[in-house]
Amino acid sequence: MSVTIALNNALSGLTAASKAASVVSSNIANANTEGYGVREVELSSASLGGQGAGVKINGISRSVDQSVLADRRAADAAYASAATQASYYASIENAIGLPGDDGSLSSELAKFDAALIEAASRPDSDARLSSAVAAADSLATTLRDLSGDIQAERLEAEKQIAAQVDILNTSLSQIEDLNNEIRRQTANGNEALALMDQRQVLIDQVASIVPVNVVDRDFGQVALISDGGGVLLDGRAAEFSFEDVGAIVPEMTVEGGALNYVEMNGSPVDTSATINPLKGGSLEALFEVRDELAVAAQQDVDAVARDLIERFADTAVDPTLSPGDPGLFTDDGAAFDASLETGVAGRISINALVDPDQGGETWRLRAGLGATSPGEPGAGAILLSLSDALNGPKVAASGSFSSIPRSAADLASDFLSKIGTARQASEGEVAYTSAKWEALRTLELEGGVDTDQELQKLLVIEDAYAANARVIQTVDEMLDLLLRI
């Protein structure tokens, strides 16, 4: 081996060691950087004229376990979907209130029942009659507030849909730009690893909203295909649009045209379909809250309100009523009409005939709503009938309740139980998906930067650097010796 070849070999070794040290330092510095892929220097032996010519730097590779990454992204979407539903059910359960909680539906029914019994024990007491009227009004207010809370959840879902569509559009557009830049850099022979790190973070953002599969394309580019088969990005990013409304009432549905679908490249996407481009993830879960879960809850609370109205509109309960007259509880002052049931919980109110604030008289609770005079002060038969009507068995005429006869309190309890059961199931799903995400995230991190391993590499690099430097020093000493001869 000539001195020149030895010198060239050593110089190439120093260059490779320097590059490797730079890569190791980059790995250690980015150990906690989201989306960072571990860098590795790719080396090969160089030859010139069939003889060794040192070491050749082929490039720097980015190491990411794509299988684990794909599974973790799927877990992201599953967790986001479960958490969205769990949050909704928890909010509705809180709005209904637990038995014994002040202001809960069950507590208001119990207070109303107790007020009727107290009034029946002293029908001549104006104070007790007033208390019974106030308890009835408070119960109606609780139902109206509950209906309002359900619609508020739908409106919140609507706003979050609009926000997530904006995030989706922005992220996909940025991924498209990064794809183009990665293609240019790769085609020019430059490294684009930092751009790939940024792209990975953006794909993670998209994946929690809509689950995606990443498909490699030429020159380092990727395409994004949703689990539902939608092409979110392949060359060009898909464009999503959504027009949110400022307010939502029970009568508003997407089927009726009052609420909007999200559109993908100008075409509406029905997220309730078994297969759709937005299947899975938080975006579909938000549509499910707005268009299915909250709608079902509204139907059930309307059924509770209808049941209450019909119990007291029976002429057998209050003989002074004529068929078709509104009873103690009304649909915004009118008799209940089954064709207008949607939203009745938000309109339920006490009959103005017994409400002093509306010009009524509390004695009508004792004498009957259709009575023309206060009658006997000690007559408590109608008050007892009202209490019996509240506690008597009756099959709910609507909602998702079974055909088992129940009291008004039992119907309210079943409504709470359904929501509570759904909440527990959704929280169980949250726990499962969270544990799965944690396990996959741990695997992903284990495949990331290992600082101990990088420091060990650095020791090897230092030894290689020192060895090549020693070769150069030896060559220098040899040349110096030759020059002195």
Image (cartoon, grey):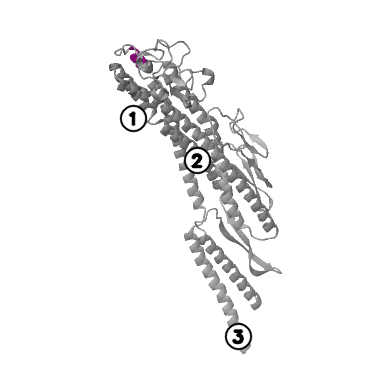
Q: Please report whichever mark, 2 or 1, sits nearer to the chain's N-terminal start.
A: 2
3D distance between C-alphas at marks 2 and 3: 70 Å
Q: What element carries label 2?
A: helix
Quick check: 192 above or below 135? Answer: below
Quick check: 283 above or below 354? Answer: below
Q: Nearer the viewer, mark 2 or mark 3?
A: 2
3D distance between C-alphas at marks 3 and 1: 97 Å
Quick check: 200 above or below 291? Answer: below
Q: Quadrant of the N terminus?
A: bottom right
Pinpoint residue 471: horizontal percent, then vertical percent.
58, 76
Q: Nearer the viewer, residue 62 or 286?
A: 286
Left or right, 199 with respect to 443, comes to: right
- Is residue 451 in view from this perspective? yes
Pinpoint residue 440: horizontal percent, then vertical percent.
50, 46
The residue under label 1 is 100
* Segment colored magenta: 381-387
The residue under label 3 is 480
The residue under label 2 is 79
Q: Which of 48 and 234 is in front in this view?
A: 234
> Which residue reaches farthest right?
49
Pinpoint residue 131: horizontal percent, then vertical percent.
33, 24
Q: Which of marks 2 and 1 is in front?
A: 1
Dominant secondary-structure state across the stretch colored magenta: helix
**Label 2 Cα crowd, 10 Å radius (few <14 / some 14-19 / many 20+):** many
Q: Which of 6 and 395 is in front in this view?
A: 395
Pinpoint residue 119: horizontal percent, then vertical percent.
31, 19
**Label 1 Cα crowd, 10 Å radius (few <14 / some 14-19 / many 20+):** few
Q: Which residue shows up at 45% across the image and 18% down it? A: 396
61 in the magenta segment: no
Q: Which residue shows up at 60% across the image and 82% down it? A: 478
Circles 2, 3 touching at the beta carbon (< 8 Å): no
Quick check: 56 above or below 82? Answer: below
